[in-house]
Image: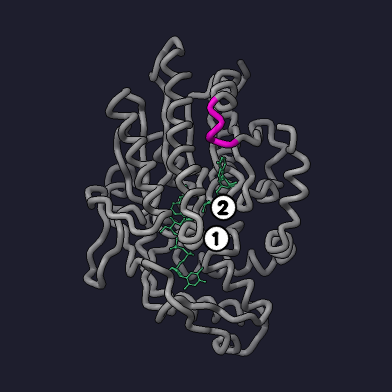
Amino acid sequence: MNNFKRSIIVTGGAGFIGSHVVRHLIKHHPDYLIINVDKLTYAGNLENLKDIENEPGYLFRRIDICDHQAIMRLMTDYNVTGIIHLAAESHVDRSIEDPFTFARTNVLGTLSLLQSARNVWEQSPEGYDGKLFYHISTDEVYGALDFDGSLFTESTPYAPHSPYSASKASSDHFVRAFHDTYGMPCIITNCSNNYGPYQFPEKLIPLFINNICHNRSLPVYGEGLNVRDWLYVEDHAAAIDLIFHKGTVGETYNIGGFNEKKNIDLVHALIKVTDRLLGRPEGASIPLITYVSDRKGHDLRYAIDASKLQRELGWTPSLQFEEGLERTVRWYLDNREWMERVTTGEYEDYYKNMYADR
Ligand code: NAD
Ligand code: DAU
């Protein structure tokens, strides 16, 4: 037992979105114990949480979500009543090279976590009362849209194309199956592309900011005409907090930025802000744009209808894209040492040695 009002596990809390979720929860719920469960893969970096690591309501445990016994022990020791599940392999290009790792973590890892929660919660005196398994998923499970103005809604049939989205779709189905079969209280959200501080620089925005700084080429896949819907990561974290507390069990909610951008337009916007903040003449980095072979199976367009979340829980993104982009570029320029450590892998040795025996 502990003195906190509630103990919650956030899986994948050392990653990009997870670190924002942990920080947001620590700030807004000082009476909660937030347990960050993360395996620390290449994408997990505890430096992302340096500013809150000494807060009394924060605890880190280096655990693989597939480790059924360790998760059950942790849940029992701290009387965990909520799980916000973000841990995953998240990069589409890596999934094309190595689909098995994605199936292991995203499918089997989620199943193992569900089973751990089921075992512990079913045997607790109140059963599932006051418990919640909240699964964070992606808009990519819905497949791809045409340039016809259509949007993904919560009832759009699943049609994943990449190994990444197939693994996330599968994990969503397992979460629903645990709700429908065992009565486990679950919620799923499907969100669009996030951007902001602490994103691993394999993803478009941080990769391109870093490349602009180093005068390296900017590899635009295909003709750069694919469309993504962009949401500032702190708005996603706020939505997760709201849904965790006010969402209806058994429901799915789409989360999106109402902010579609063609990749090439986004790249030009990024160049404009980055050049300005670096003190370079306008357009100086445009020649760095290099059109390269398209991603295999590259989904043409994603666009989210987040009106259910707006209507039912009153959520709306707080930040305009221009402001979010400026904030993001500034953060990466002000934190070039973070970028350096992440791209050289230096942080991996440091933290992995520190937590080697956990
Ligand atoms: P990320 O790759 O930055 O972080 C993933 C984290 O999970 C890392 O800290 C990693 O160490 C950890 N992890 C991986 N395998 C693990 C395992 N077996 N056990 C424990 N921890 C493990 O990912 P992200 O971009 O922050 O995405 C987080 C979640 O949000 C994912 O589930 C992703 O599918 C979903 N999502 C992401 C986006 C986006 O734009 N990034 C959009 C919608 C949904
Ligand atoms: O839609 C939500 C998804 O957004 C999340 O579920 C994923 O975890 C997250 O990685 C992201 O997937 P994308 O594939 O859309 O993100 P990425 O940043 O890899 O690519 C964005 C777009 O830019 C996409 O159309 C591919 C393109 N791209 C990407 C890279 C890395 C390029 O043109 N060049 C690049 O070098």
Q: Nearer the viewer, residue 81 or 299?
A: 299
User: Upstream in the sequence, badge 2 or badge 1?
Assistant: 2
Judged from the image, the secondary structure of the residue bearing numbered disc 2 is helix
User: Where, by quadrant of the figure, is residue 343 drawn?
Assistant: bottom right
Q: Amino acid at mark 1?
A: Gly
Query: Residue 142 at what x, y percent from top left?
Result: 30, 55
Residue 265 in view in this figure? no
Picture residue at 73% right of the left edge, 60% below the top: 341
Any atom of ligand 1 within 8 Å of the CB at mark 2? yes
Locate residue 174, reporting x and y percent: 35, 36
In the displayed structure, 341 sits above or below 333; it is: above
Residue at 45 percent across and 19 percent down: it is 119
**Quarter of the image containing the C terminus?**
top right
**Residue linked to disc 2:** 16
- Is there any visible trace of residue 260 in the rendered image? yes
User: Seen from this angle, which residue lies furthest top?
Assistant: 125
Q: Which residue type does callout 2 highlight?
A: Phe
Label 2 environment density (alpha carbons within 10 Å; few <14, some 14–19, many ≥20): many
Query: Marks 2 and 1: which is nearer the front?
Result: 2
Tell me if residue 31 comes above or below residue 168 in the rendering. Answer: above
The colour mode here is one colour
**What is the x, y in percent for residue 46?**
68, 46
The kind of secondary structure element at disc 1 is loop
Occupied quadrant, residue 318? bottom left
Q: What are the residue bounds of the magenta stretch?
A: 64-68
Residue 196, numbered circle: 1
| Cβ–Cβ under 8 Å for marks 2 and 1 | yes
- Residue at x-position 50% and y-position 56%: 98
